[in-house]
Image: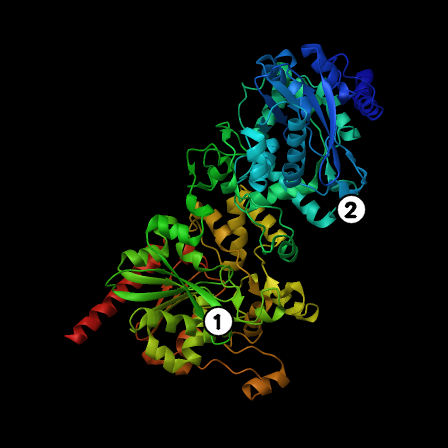
Amino acid sequence: MKALSTLYYIIPLLTLYFSMEKVNIFSPFKTNDWHQNPAGIVKIIQRYTGVCETHHLQTDDGYILTMFQIPRRNPKGVILLQHPIFFDSRIWVSQYNNSIAFLFWNAGYEVWLGNTRGNFFSKKHTNLSSTDPAFWNFTFHEMGYYDNHATIEYIKRNTSQSKIIFVGYSMGGTSGFVYASTRPEDASRSVKVIITMAAVTHLSRGTSFSKYIVPPFFFLQRNLKFVDAYFTVLRYDSWYLRLVRSLFAAFPCRKCIIYANGLISGWTPDELDPDLVDELMQVFGSEVPLKMFDHYNQIYISGGEFRMYDYGERENVHLYGTKKPPWYPLEDIKVPIFLMYGQNDSFICPKKQNNTCKSYLSYFNIFFSSDCYHNPDQDDDILGIIQRHVGVHETHEVQTDDGYFLTLFRIPRQNPRGVIFFQHPLTTDARVWVGQYNESVAFLFWRAGYDVWLGNIRGSHCCKKHVSLDPTEAAFWNFSFHEIGYYDNHASIEYVKQQTGGSKIIYLGYSLGGTSGMVYASTRDKEAADSVKMMVVITPTTHLQLSCTSLLKYLLFISYNLQGVVSLADPLFVFNQQDAWYAKIGRFLVTHFPCKKCMLYFSYLFVGFSEDAFEPDLINMFVRVHMSEYPLKMLYHYYQMYVVDGIFQRYDYGEETNLLLYGTKEPTSYPLENIKVPVYIVSGANDNLDCPNAIEKLYNLLPKNSTAHGKLMVEGFNHLDYAYGRYRNEKVYFKILQLLDKIHLDDQNCLH
């Protein structure tokens, strides 16, 4: 037993030693020529065809590429085979006598095996070494634009063929589309047809386990740049890959390897040839720059947008002339394309993958559970969602008095019962009103006969324009809910009133939308009375109090104290930047984290507990919708109200500035007593942000004639349930519609 115990420790050490020392411990298993010398590809080709030639060529940007030719007299045509990521040209001859390259050669074609920059055969450059970070500053874009172009032109010059056939596998197909779309004239002159096998061009939210691997590389790329060894991934001759091959060679469970491959590339357990499993490991491991992962991750994060590399807004403007990288112009392709793909391919996802489940438990098996399905709304923008469920929409733009441009979305209706304007909460935009699929709040009111307008506040996803300021400037974000109420709501309401014939509208604001609604109605009381028929405010957060138990008070405290260390000139003047790398990674992790209940319970610490109220099929939509930027000043303003125990007051700039702005050392309270518009307050008994005491305080401060319709306290509701609770329509919006119907009926009776 002692001897066995000793062997238990010695064997792994010997394995590590042999892998480090490059001892050929694979020889008992395989005898191929490329275990220690990948250049043995020439011997392999000669063994099965009797002929092989090696060629070297230079790209326009200085890389030296190696190609292998299997020549044939009087061929039917010339085929270029371009390999996938992590591999090189050996993949085309790694199936013994049935290798893909030999199949085409035996069919009468002259075969050329390409190798892109950076792989084992193409590590030379006119003035860069492969140990220089600059050598690895490329993605599949450069492979398509430079490598494919140089390779194809070289083949044309060295054969009698005027056009060749291009076959690209995975990344080879990606680079093929880059070449054909960015050099359409060259491609049409030189290529007869492009055949792509599993071309990864629109990488989106599929089922592959690799989606959990890509974001860490994205993080490394952004933070390490190209400093140190991490600028490349998987060196073929590295000690860790030799160790993996050593362990693999001694590992008897080949089925386990096949199943592991299925987690990444897709589930086809009986398709991978057992005889080729060892070969797969021997040819696997070609270097790839982190920038390549970053580019693929950018496509993935965007939901499958096949765009050029995103260097950031400033560099994009310099390189492309636009803040966002341009799409690859696939519409310019002039070469015939033949697409090949697998139904179970997890990377290209020919089937729409599940993104929604009807129960929380099913998220642990989201891709295979019959309780889960694909909901297209999650991957669509607001106009696409409205078009899918209603079929009609309009987009409008309005300018505020202080120069911000706001985008409004309209779901029009002829001869409506009334016009209703929705204003969204913090951290989101107008999408929150259409984020419940076919049962969305906006659609509910539209089907009830109302002309629906969806507002967006300054700084939200579609409202980042100003007459003179740019959203990269701190001054653009110098606002809180005061400016939203005084300027944004005023401009939006007046515009809607003008567009709909001049009659009064109904205002419905949720959370921040309710806060800004109270600002508007109290500071522009006469204009509000002329333009607003009724104001419905859902959990308006006007009187944040010390007695409320939400953990938000600690977040507000931290944010407020950032004033001492973060000036408005710092990038942190914006919170929750939607396009920031950390926001993208956060969305990715939260969306794919299977324990949705854990996320929900964490949110309850801030918004209040509401047992089993949050609909399971809305939780991923919630993550996608609630990612809109807002300034730290917004949090500062809310915190200022909190520390004075719920006084609804203007922003406190300090005594000196307060005297200039307000005429007093302390900020003045909002004059709620001036409100002339009827106000209907909706609140939740379990809301920890806007707790019942705070709602009661607001209600008592309003004039009696403004509270004639009373208020609605919803038992068991927290701060989120008005948008995502399973009983939101039954307990809230149906009752609001009943009240509006009653008011409408009373108005009709008054007319008669």
Where 563 sits versus 248, above or below? below
Q: Is 286 positioned to the left or the right of 694 in the image?
A: right
Residue corresponding to mark 2: 227
The Cα atoms of the two marked residues, 2 and 1, are separated by: 44 Å
Which residue lies most toward the bottom here? 663
The answer to whether residue 204 is visible is: yes
Where 412 sits versus 363, above or below? below
Residue at 31% of width from left, 60% of height from top?
A: 412
Query: Residue 289: x percent and y percent?
Result: 71, 39
- 236 or 65, which is in the foreground? 65
Q: Which kind of residue does numbered mark 1 sit on?
A: Ile
Residue at 64% of width from left, 34% of height from top?
A: 148
Q: Which kind of residue does numbered mark 2 sit on?
A: Val
Q: Residues within 10 Å of mark 2 (few under 14, many from 20)?
A: few
Query: Residue 633: x percent and y percent?
Result: 58, 70
Q: Is 744 positioned to the left or the right of 685 in the image?
A: left
Residue corresponding to mark 1: 484
Q: Mark on residue 77?
A: none
**Dividing the picture into quarters, in which one does residue 499 lie?**
bottom left
Q: Is 598 positioned to the left or the right of 383 in the image?
A: right
The answer to whether residue 511 is visible is: no
Q: Is 185 positioned to the left or the right of 727 in the image?
A: right
- 77 or 215, which is in the foreground? 77
- 656 or 126, which is in the foreground? 126
> For the residue labelled by badge 2, is the local secondary structure a helix, a strand or a loop?
loop
Residue at 63% of width from left, 30% of height from top?
A: 84
